[in-house]
């Protein structure tokens, strides 16, 4: 099925009733009528290749998405091409809400790995807010959660040392990934490069490389071709002076 932006949405591999994320303890259960609405709200699924741009800053998107599988990151660019990565998205995260509510995207989103996205029509949001206050609250909760994560990230950039910043960022991503099952029964492997870390922490690539080596020397992480493998997430949190993710059951749209 073609979307308004020219992308093709696949037939559903995963009906909402059989969503692979819903059994995870991280997500709250839907009421029966909420699940029925979300099932009609969802217009299809979109497969995205690694490195593809999902949303572009300044664009008007007719859709918003829930990440069903895979990794992505949100970023902004300065006019000279310098990039600031704002946050990372993984299964269960809602992306594109800003463009749906404010008219145009204020950031871009790029896939860190192959992704599968659930696609929702922006115009249907009005019906959600009118007729499903529980789901409307969920969207507000998700937006508030994003703000809380950005607050913590800003604290890290403003007050943590470079070593603490890197430890916090890796522990933050690893903790979120573990909650949504991205590690399986193995250590979390985050598909990022050192350039991604540099662009998130506001450090030079040389400084980032030296900082990552210190974490490796402490045997907290391994750095492989596929990205960063976390060895000891608890010690990363301790080094960063970060208590970790504690949000209980969260919404899933």
Image (spheres, rainbow, N blue to C red):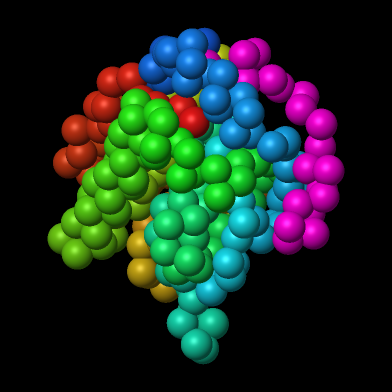
Query: Considering depth in this image, is 6 or 182 the residue closer to the camera?
Result: 6
Instruction: Give the prevailing secondary structure in the magenta stretch.
Output: loop
Q: Residue at x 61, y 46 (%)?
A: 121
Query: Considering depth in this image, is 32 or 81 the residue closer to the camera?
Result: 32
Total marks shown come to 0
Q: Is residue 183 left or right of residue 70?
A: left
Q: Is residue 149 above or below residue 245?
A: below
> Which corner quadrant of the image does residue 47 belong to?
top right
Q: Is residue 37 left or right of residue 146?
A: right
* Residue 223 seen in the current view: no
Q: Residue at x 46, y 45 (%)?
A: 126
* Magenta segment: 1-22
Q: Is residue 166 above or below residue 67?
A: below
> Which corner quadrant of the image does residue 17 belong to?
top right
Q: Is residue 59 left or right of residue 205?
A: right
* Residue 154 seen in the current view: yes
Task: Assess whether residue 113 is covered by the magenta stretch.
Answer: no
**Relative image position of residue 206 (x, y in whole percent):** 45, 70
**Relative image position of residue 203 (x, y in whole percent):** 37, 69
Q: Residue at x 73, y 60 (%)?
A: 5
**Relative image position of residue 1 (x, y in whole percent):** 83, 43
**Relative image position of residue 178 (x, y in whole percent):** 45, 25
Q: Residue at x 49, y 76 (%)?
A: 77
């Amino acid at each position: 099925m073609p979307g308004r932006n020219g992308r093709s949405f696949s037939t559903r591999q995963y009906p909402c009733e059989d969503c692979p994320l819903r059994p995870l303890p991280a997500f709250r259960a839907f009421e029966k009528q909420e699940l029925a609405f979300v099932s009609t709200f969802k217009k299809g699924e979109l497969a995205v290749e690694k490195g593809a741009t999902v949303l572009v800053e300044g664009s008007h998107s007719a859709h918003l998405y829930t990440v069903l599988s895979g990794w992505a990151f949100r970023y902004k660019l300065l006019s000279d091409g310098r990039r600031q990565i704002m946050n990372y998205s993984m299964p269960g995260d809602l992306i594109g809400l800003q463009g749906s509510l404010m008219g145009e995207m204020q950031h871009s989103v790029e896939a860190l790995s192959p992704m599968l996205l659930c696609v929702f029509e922006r115009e249907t949001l009005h019906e959600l807010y009118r007729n499903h206050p529980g789901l409307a609250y969920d969207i507000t909760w998700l937006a508030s959660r994003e703000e809380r994560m950005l607050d913590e990230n800003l604290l890290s950039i403003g007050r943590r040392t470079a070593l603490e910043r890197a430890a916090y960022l890796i522990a933050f991503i690893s903790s979120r990934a573990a909650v949504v099952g991205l590690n399986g029964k193995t250590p979390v492997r985050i598909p990022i490069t050192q350039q991604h870390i540099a662009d998130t922490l506001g450090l030079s690539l040389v400084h980032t490389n030296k900082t990552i080596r210190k974490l490796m020397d402490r045997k907290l992480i391994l750095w492989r071709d596929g990205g960063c493998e976390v060895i000891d997430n608890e010690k990363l949190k301790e080094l960063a002076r970060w208590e970790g993710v504690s949000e209980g059951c969260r919404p899933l749209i």
